[in-house]
Amino acid sequence: NGVAGLLPYNLSLEVVMAIEAGLGDLPLFPFSSPSASWSNDPVSFLQSLCHTVVVQGVSAILAFPQSRGEMLELDFVSAALRIPVVSIVLGEFPRRSPNPLHLQMSLENSLSSDADVTFSILAMNNWFNFSLMLCQEEWNITDFLTQQSSKFHLGSIINITANLTSTSELLNYLQFYLENIKDTTSTMVMFGCDMEKTRRIFEITTRFGVMPPELHWIIGDAQNVEELRTEGLPLGLIAHGKTTQAVFEHYVQDAMELVARAVAAATMIQPELALIPSTTNCMDTDERNITSGQYLSKFLANTTFDGLSGHIKVKGSSIVSSENNFFIWNLQHDPVGNPMWTRLGSWQEGKIIMDYGIWPEQAQRHKNHMQHPTRLHLRVVTLIEHPFVFTRDVDDEGLCPAGQLCLDPLTNDSAVLDNLFETLQRGNDTVPIELKKCCYGYCIDLLEKLAEDMNFDFDLYIVGDGKYGAWKNGHWTGLVGDLLAGTAHMAVTSFSINTARSQVIDFTSPFFSTSLGILVRTRDTAAPIGAFMWPLHWTMWLGIFVALHITAIFLTLYEWKSPFGMTPKGRNRNKVFSFSSALNVCYAILFGRTAAIKTPKCWTGRFLMNLWAIFCLFCLSTYTANLAAVMVGEKIYEELSGIHDPKLHHPSQGFRFGTVRESSAEDYVRQSFPEMHEYMRRYNVPATPDGVAYLKHDPEKLDAFIMDKALLDYEVSIDADCKLLTVGKPFAIEGYGIGLPPNSPLTSNISDLISQYKSHGFMDVLHDKWYKVVPCGKRSFAVTETLQMGIKHFSGLFVMLCIGFGLSILTTIGEHIVYRLVLPRIKKKSKMKYWLHTSQRLHRALNSSFIEDKCQPKTKRVEKRSHVGNSQHAVWNTANLGNCHRKKYICTDEGQNEVTIRQHQDILLPQVRRETPASLTTNGKAESFNIPRTSVMQELMELEKQIEIIKQELQLAMDRKSELEEYQRTNRTAEP
């Protein structure tokens, strides 16, 4: 039971068999006599049916009418009850109009099936001119003629009737017609001829030599494989038929499965409408609401499956077709030379599927001495698209050392192509060398692999108009046009599979998956003023300077809280480590400044300083590593998010974008975005290389180029200047397939081989071979030129330095303001005079009685007078220098002259009493003396005089020392 497992929700299909006039367990029909006619009282008949069928919840009726009257009764029942009826009939009953509620399934193969198979064979071999031979006068070929399309041309119809009993009459008749059609007909199709009559016809025509040798013969009627004979039949004869015959039970089973599948599909969408009958009163119908039967009939019309009797599908909403899977045979020689029927393939769902890539050629059919089947010879059309198809010129002898020889005829005229390829096959070197090319690439490798595995030869040429194919001016152009016209048997290139093309030609399964993408060009810009800051993010810069000041604060705190720190309470040092000293240390480490700094003395401060140095090392290393990459300038490009970007739908003035004419990309844009397509038509280009060239042109002719992403990725990878870039999200997923004429027998075979190539890794090998190239190949040769940075790259540093000059002027002004306005105000107060923790210089300025810098010019003048013509060192009296206070004195305008200095040189300093030594420090603090106040004041005055003299002499000595050191360095440099 094939119905099991089809219904959801654990539902089951109950089949109630009819018993005489009743319906099994259901009540009997009101009429018991088979002769009773429903037409006598249709109302009573309808009421009985309503109570018998509808009330019991019947979803569909399976009937077996045997006459046209019973078919009309079932039509009335289905229309009145609005319940689907499936009738299984011996032969199809014609009806004036289809009834979607009443479907009929015929047990007999219709002539249309035989006609479909025959036309498939004719189209596969490009036999468009044919004639018919009828062996029965009453044979109806109307269905066959109605299926004839415009590309087929029917010649003569030869009737071999029973009146032609004698051999001479039949011979004269055949000789007359065969002589007339030999120039206009390539194929003869026979209908209504049994094996005996067929054998007689061929024996007579062969014996007397009236059969044209170039004529192909096809038996149009389905044959039984057991009745096929070989005696007296010509080689190359083609026939079709079935190996097994479907029985009645198979049709019944398929009809039940059809209903079950329809119920299952309907239940998944609206179970309440599919499972609960909506008709309760057959006499009161509501046309506004759809019934469960009408709802189910929609799913019956769209249900297809492979049943026991064949491929089940509904045609014209009322005919259940059981398309048989026919086998196709051909009379050939076996390996020992005897005639034998050989199966070539099968016919399934309207297409011929070949078992092998072999099809008998004309030479095989009419040359009996050939012992083996010849190879299939195909003509393949391609289109240049890198990396799938490349071309290069042939060598001097017109041959291709590598790749396949292909022609570039610049035309799609079949006669011209036939002449060119025949010339090549004869070995005549009369084909112009400019038409010869060497084709190679991804698709050529795939074509060679298919030819090897399917055992066929091919002639290769480039499509004349350079187009993929589109419907234009009433016909198809490009690759599609060549396939439809029979000029080519196969199209191999980056051939996108889309809906429009699939409706007119066949495609194999995709061998390459891709999508549409957008290509733009990048532009290098000069680095702006602040480019030197780009190696680090602004948050990193902020973090560095925040960390610097926090580190300075902690250095100051650790130093002032340590017993070994450089502070007044530390170890009585001459210097004080203040917050300004900590800032100086941190900035010097950060920027690598080598100026003299005060370093912390405590262990904790030194550890923290070294930790800060490690932090700065990693920050500066990162900055240096990224500096060259960002200073060369930023690459800018058109930022497009995808096909829905506003720049494409509402392009601003001057924004130009396009695609390749008559490509799948243009077809997609035309169908999905008509307004966008209307705008971009003016910018479309003939081929992908033209679009890339327009992007790279200076100035640019295109701002964006839309095409298959597989092609764009390759163009990006081979761009020597690295200026191309794909942007946005991919869209319109598609695949590349091999194009074939409609109903081609090679479609299934090639698709199977492509699937095998994918699973075995052959397609990955091709991808690696043609796609794994070095991105931006020439960039490595231009590294020096690209990374050279001129003054424009560091313009920001120069601007920053100029700003620093201006800020230094402001800082100088600020120092004078502090000195002349702020410090005098603070000095007048008794508080806020202790600033050692912040700045030692500020503290000294607030706690001194004069400014030392005023005496500096006077001292310099004294130094110059005391050293004129005298180069020896002075003798200094420094006996008591260690106990002196470093105290300021007030300079007068007259100052100290040289005589005064000499007079004070020999004055002995008064000795401070040892019994009351003073503990002095250099930071301004001293312990008190236990001596009278008057003596202290006098002694202080004397000490101040001596200190002043010593300071002047010390200054002179330091200046003299500097001069001698400078003289020594100069002489040392001058020596060889």
Image: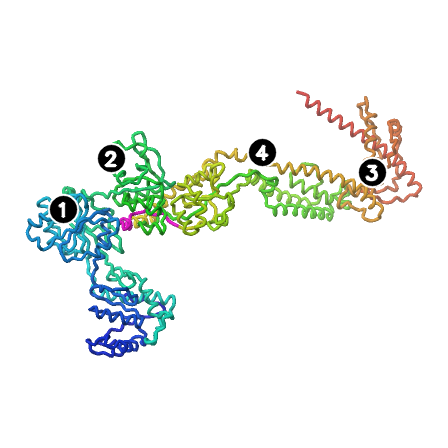
Reading the chain from its start, which is encountered first: label 2 or label 4?
Answer: 2
Distance, label 1 to label 4, CA atoms, is: 89 Å
Q: In this picture, is 323 found above or below 942?
A: below
Give the foreground label among 2 and 4: 2
Q: What residue is shown with label 3?
A: 851
Distance, label 2 to label 4, CA atoms, is: 64 Å
Q: Amino acid at mark 4?
A: Gly
Q: Please state the extent of the stretch shown in magenta in the rendering.
A: 734-749
Distance, label 1 to label 2, CA atoms, is: 31 Å
Q: Is residue 142 magenta?
A: no
Give the quarter of the image for residue 970: top right
Q: What residue is shown with label 4?
A: 790
Q: Secondary structure at mark 4?
A: loop
Q: Secondary structure at mark 1?
A: helix
* In this picture, residue 519 sits left or right of residue 831: left
Q: Amino acid at mark 2?
A: Thr
Give the foreground label among 1 and 4: 1
Distance, label 3 to label 2, CA atoms, is: 112 Å
Instruction: Give x and y (percent) for residue 910.
Output: 89, 35
Distance, label 3 to label 4, CA atoms, is: 48 Å
Q: Nearer the viewer, residue 507 or 114?
A: 114
Q: Amino acid at mark 1?
A: Leu
Q: What residue is shown with label 1?
A: 178
Cβ atoms at labels 1 and 4 below 8 Å apart: no
The quadrant of the image that shows the C terminus is top right
Q: Amino acid at mark 3?
A: Ile
* In this picture, residue 63 sits left or right of residue 334: right
Reading the chain from its start, which is encountered first: label 1 or label 3?
Answer: 1
Q: Nearer the viewer, residue 136 or 869?
A: 136
Q: What residue is shown with label 2?
A: 423
Give the foreground label among 1 and 3: 1
